[in-house]
Image (cartoon, grey):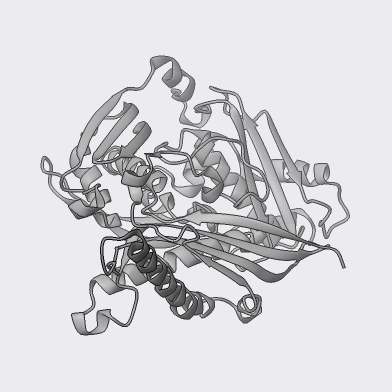
Amino acid sequence: MKTYLFTSESVSEGHPDKVADQISDAVLDEFLARDPKSKVACETLVTTGQVVVAGEVKSNAYVDLMDVTRQVIRSIGYDRSELKFDGEACGVFSALHEQSADINRGVEREDAEAQGAGDQGMMFGYACDETPDYMPLTLDLSHRLLRELADIRREAEHMTWEKRGRVFTYLRPDSKSQVTVEYDENNRPLRVDTIVISTQHDEFIKPADDTSEAQAEADRAMQARIEKDVREILIPRVKAQLPAEVADLITDFKLLVNPTGKFVIGGPHGDTGLTGRKIIVDTYGGRGAHGGGAFSGKDPSKVDRSAAYAARHIAKNLVAAGIAREVLVQVAYAIGCAQPVSLCVNTYGTSRIDMTDSEIADIVKAMPCFDMTPYAIEKRFDLRQPIYRETASYGHLGRQPRKVIKHFHSRYEPDFTKEVELFTWEKLDAVDAVKKAFGL
């Protein structure tokens, strides 16, 4: 039997690029919470002790940019000076300005339903039946490892001193994961081959003296302790969350933990972060395809974001309805035009019905529940709500829809709360319509 290995990675909320994404999406949420018609394109750069927020905005709302930025940084865990990036002390520079009138004229219309796409480009949505959330197994596991690692870090912060010695007590916010899975010739996962975890940590074992040998010995001891905790605490906790058939794939695997031997310097101090640099982490981990446009910091008039979510919704509902085991949907737009210039479907030869991919695409295009005009997408998924901060780490796709109460604070306006629904594009609410349209 021929087999092959495939790998995906994830990065934590404390990774510098993800810090930038979260700031951009938090700024977007603040504008949408106060003025749902806001047009926002927000880019963030983070580095040692400094944040730069730039971009274009058209809104009737006022947002306390400095306060929002600091709140995000503190909530991630950058809250002390020794990390060289502290939410209380870092500089925040704003370079937001008015949206271009030439762009705005292509988007807004007197008839809202005629709203044009905010830019040209192609977007992709993908789904497969490898996991219960219709995501590639390699990426699903990569995300789960880091979400659990972040949960452990926050648990340790709130433990009593007596209990802290029993779990990870040294974790810092920056971390990365990578999972390699072996697949058979039918693209079915056989086993997890390799797990890589790189996590930033305190220098929790000090060298016996000032010699390089003593430092090297202390570094080896720290690495050994972290690897032991990953193997004995982190991975079992993740396996406990998985269906039995998936957990059984994680048995005899190679584990690499902090392969350089030490990871104390991290976050924006170790590496400059920029909005939109983790688009493969944000989507499908290298499976399917990606059109190139980033998501974070963009309001839903930017089809880079909204149409990618809508294409995922189509692909997921097609797979869930039994049309195919694997589906890729591509949609493309011209700036200022409401109707897509193209929509195609690729089932990779896994179709379970007697139709070509082009025939499947023709039916999809005719289904009212899959209207791909920008206005229809915004309405269908209620995208003009402050729902984006939560998308900016651990993936925009494959998440569970849920309602939450969000609190908004400003030094200049009264505080208020708002109930919103997150990840609406992940709903399997079109399965019945798909089955009916395809005669299933």
Q: Quadrant of the N terminus?
A: bottom right
Residue 72 drawn above or below residue 247: above
Q: Whole-percent x and y of residue 195?
A: 57, 66
- Asked if one can make out residue 63 in the rendered structure from this viewpoint, the answer is no
Residue 255 appears in the figure: yes
Q: Is residue 77 above or below residue 297?
A: below
- Write the residue at 29% across / 67% down: 207
Q: Quadrant of the C terminus?
A: bottom right
- The percent coordinates of residue 322 (x first, y second) are 75, 63
Q: Percent position (x, y) of residue 439?
A: 80, 58
Q: Is residue 224 above or below residue 26?
A: below
Image quadrant in which you'd find residue 127:
bottom right
Which quadrant of the figure has residue 46? top left
Residue found at x 42% / y 53%: 393
Residue visible at 32% across and 83% down in the picture: 166
Q: Answer left or right for 357 relative to 211.
A: right
